[in-house]
Image: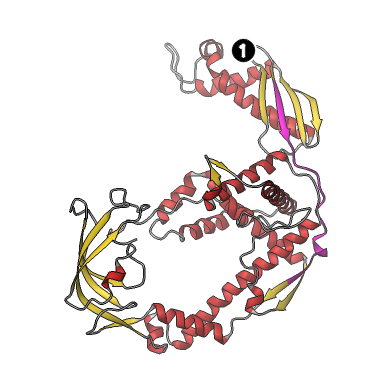
Amino acid sequence: MQVKEVKSEGLNYELEITVEAKDIDKHVDAKLAEYGKTIKLPGFRPGKVPMDLLKQRYGKAVLGEVLESAVNDSTQKALNEKGLRPALQPKIEVKEFDEGKDLVYHMNVEVLPEFEVMDLKKLKLEKPVTKADKKSVDEALERIASGNRDTQEVDRAAKNGDVVRIDFHGRTADDNKEHPGMHAHGHNLELGSNQFIPGFEEQLIGAKKGGKVEVKVSFPKEYHSEELAGRDAIFDVEVHAVLEPTEAKIDDEFAKKLGLEDVKALRSAVEEQIQAEYDQVSRLRLKRELLDQIDDAHDFSVPQGMLDLEFGNIKQQISIEQPEKVVDGELKFEKDEEEELLAISERRVRLGMILSEIGRSNNIQVTDHELQRAVISEAQKYPGQEAQVFEYYKSNRQALDALRAPVFEDKVVDYILELADVKEKEVSLDELTADEEEESYSSKKKAKGGAKKSTAKTEDKGDAEKKAPAKKTAAKKETAKK
C-alpha cells in the first residue's frame, strides 16, 4: 500500500492511497474462500470447489464487496501511518479500480485538532447548596393533599371546582350522526379542569342532580380525530350527582392512604424528594460553572464538519420549538442570530472534544450496566410503552450511542470534580433557582467573543443528541375529552 499526501490545509487532509493488485487479489481470494464453503457446483462438494474455478465463475461478482473491504482496511492503515485522528467519516473517491489492476482512491479527511487539556486541579469552583426547610415541606404537603381530596355528594347546583357524575351522548350538529367515543356513562368530570373540549364544562355549571343539559360545542380545528376536527357537536348530558371536594387532613390516616406508616414518614419522604430536586439544581449550577471555566481555558479551532453538524442540530431543534421561524420549509433568522447560533455550536463542539479527550486519556468508559440503567430510565418516561422503548434501543445502535453520550459526560464531569477545588456555599432557594431556566453550556452563549442569550433552548450535548422514540398518544376513551 502506498500513501501520498496530496494536500494539507489546517485540519483538512487529502491523501492518495494505492492498494496494489496483488493485495486486491488477497481480498478476492478471502471473499471467494468464504463463499466457497457453501457454493455447490456439479462434481464438487461444498467447500471443495477449486479457487481457480471460483475465481473464474464469481471473481467479478465479488469485486464490489472487495472494494469496500479493501478501502476500509487501507483507510484505517493510512490514518494510523500518518497519525491522523478523523473528526468525521472520511470521504472516499475511487479513481481507478478493475479486475487485475491496482486500486487508487483519494481520501479527504478532517482531523481532530491537537490541544493540551488544562491542569484540572487548578479549577476553583463554588457549589451553591440549599436545604429543604419546613416551609417548603409544608407547601409540598398542601399540594399533595390538594391532589388527593375526597368528595361528598351535595344537594345544590354545580359550581366551578365541583365534580359531576354524568352520562353523555354526542352527535355532530350538521348531520345528527353519532361517532365512536362520543358517549360515556358514569363519568366523573371536574368542572374547570379543562379535561373536555372548550365550552363543555362551563355549560354544566348550575346543573343539579337529575338535571339534563344540551351542551353545544365546536371541536378544535387541530383535534386529533380528522372526522370531528372543526365541526359543531351537540351532547345530551344527564347529571347523576354533584360532588363537592373536601379538604384532605394531613394526618396519619392520610399518610397511610399514600402507602406510608404515619405523617412523620410522609414528611420525611417529601423532604427527601425536595432535597433531591435541590441537589439536582445545585449540581447543574456547578456543572455550568465548571464547563464555563474549561471553555475559557481552551482556545483552538474546531473541525468545520463537526461545527456544521452541530449547527444543523440546533437549527432543527429551533424549527421544532419555534415553527413560526420556518418559512417555505426553511428556517429564517437574522444575521446576528445566525452568528450567535454558530458561536453556540462552536462552544458545544469544543467542550465536547475537551470532555472526550479527558475521558479517553483517563480511560473513562460507560459500562454495559450503566447503559442498561440509562435505557431503563428512559423507558420509565413512557408508562405502558416500556417494551417498545427497549426494542427501539435494541434495534437502533445510533440511538443507543446517543443515550451513552450523557452518561459518559456525567462520568467525565464527576472525574473532573474530584480533582477540582470545590467549595460549597449555602444560598436561598431563590438564589439557587435564579437562573434555572438559563441554557447550559451547549446552548448558553458563552462562546469566545461575547455573550448574548441564545435563541435555541436546548439541553446538554448528550441530551440534545439523544434520539428517543416518540411517545405515542394514548387512545381517548371519550371523544369529548381534549
Q: Position of residue 167 (x, y in %)?
A: 20, 68
Q: Residues within 10 Å of mark 1 (few under 14, many from 20)?
A: few
> Where 8 sits versus 120, above or below?
above
Report which quarter residue 416 is drawn in. Answer: bottom right
Q: Is residue 470 left or right of residue 456?
A: left
Residue annotated with mark 1: 99
Q: Identify which residue, 175 or 195, lies in the foreground.
A: 175
The count of marks equals 1
Residue type, numbered disc 1: Glu
> Where 175 sits versus 146, above or below?
above
Q: Position of residue 374 (x, y in %)?
A: 54, 57
Q: Position of residue 195 (x, y in %)?
A: 34, 66
Q: Is residue 467 magenta?
A: no
Quadrant occupied by the N terminus: top right
Tell me where the magenta segment starts and ends, as one range.
Answer: 105-126
Q: Identify which residue, 56 or 47, lies in the foreground.
A: 56
- Residue 59 visible in image: no
> Where 165 sits versus 256, above or below?
above
Quadrant occupied by the C terminus: bottom left
Residue at image x 62%, y 47%?
333
